[in-house]
Image (cartoon, helix red, strand yellow):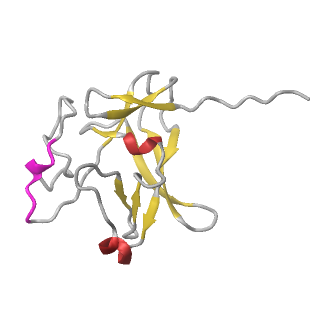
């Protein structure tokens, strides 16, 4: 019987110059490639007040239905994607066969092996919050200085 080989994952987590740990391409990836799905415990909108968040380090991803995925609880490597004001990846929502809302991470352009994969976090904050409290360290030429969504800061 022939042996089947599994392709190595397209990403790996390692130290990042931007912040803590980051996600890096293990091989060249074309534009539009799926690099993973954001995973973790799902909190429905009415459960959010009951959650015990770690305010020092969060891996939370809000979805359009009001639910939140907590990547620190049952998550995977995609929770380590760092922010950049000029990202090379995006997160897109889709519904699986069972109709559940999911989050796919795809490349926006071709990525070279070894490059860090980056999302624009586009945080939405309360009016009482100061965008400078969410400082960005991406270092891109068009860095807006904050993780907060463009137009809000």
Where residue 75 appears, as percent x and y from the top left, is 47, 50
The residues colored magenta run 128-135
Q: How many marks?
A: 0
Where residue 30 appears, as percent x and y from the top left, is 51, 30
State the residue at coordinates (50%, 25%): 26
Q: Is residue 79 above or below residue 52?
A: above
Q: For this view, does 123 lie left or right of residue 1?
A: left
Q: For this view, does 139 lie left or right of residue 76?
A: left
Q: Is residue 70 above or below residue 32?
A: below
In the foreground, 28 or 58: 58
| Residue 101 magenta-highlighted | no
State the residue at coordinates (79%, 30%): 4
| Residue 133 magenta-highlighted | yes
Helix, strand or loop: magenta stretch: loop
Where residue 135 appears, as percent x and y from the top left, is 14, 43
Q: For this view, does 32 lie left or right of residue 1?
A: left
State the residue at coordinates (22%, 59%): 124
In the foreground, 133 or 31: 133
- Furthest toward the right, the residue is 1
Placement of the N terminus among the 4 image quadrants: top right
State the residue at coordinates (17%, 34%): 142
Where residue 17 appears, as percent x and y from the top left, is 27, 26
In the foreground, 7 or 91: 7
Q: Is residue 76 above or below residue 143?
A: below
């Amino acid at each position: 019987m022939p042996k089947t080989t599994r392709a190595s994952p397209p990403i790996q987590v390692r130290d990042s110059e931007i912040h803590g740990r980051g996600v890096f391409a293990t091989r060249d990836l074309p534009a539009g490639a799926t690099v993973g799905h954001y995973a973790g415990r799902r909190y429905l909108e009415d459960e959010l007040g009951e959650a015990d968040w770690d305010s020092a380090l969060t891996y939370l991803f809000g979805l359009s239905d009001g639910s939140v995925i907590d990547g620190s609880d049952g998550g995977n490597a995609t929770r380590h994607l760092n922010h950049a004001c000029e990202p090379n990846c995006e997160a897109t929502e889709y519904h699986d066969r069972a109709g559940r809302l999911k989050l796919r991470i795809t490349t926006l352009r071709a990525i070279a092996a070894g490059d860090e994969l980056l999302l624009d976090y586009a945080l939405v904050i309360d009016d009482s919050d100061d965008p400078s409290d969410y400082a960005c360290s991406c270092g891109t030429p068009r860095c807006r200085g904050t993780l907060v969504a463009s137009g809000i800061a």
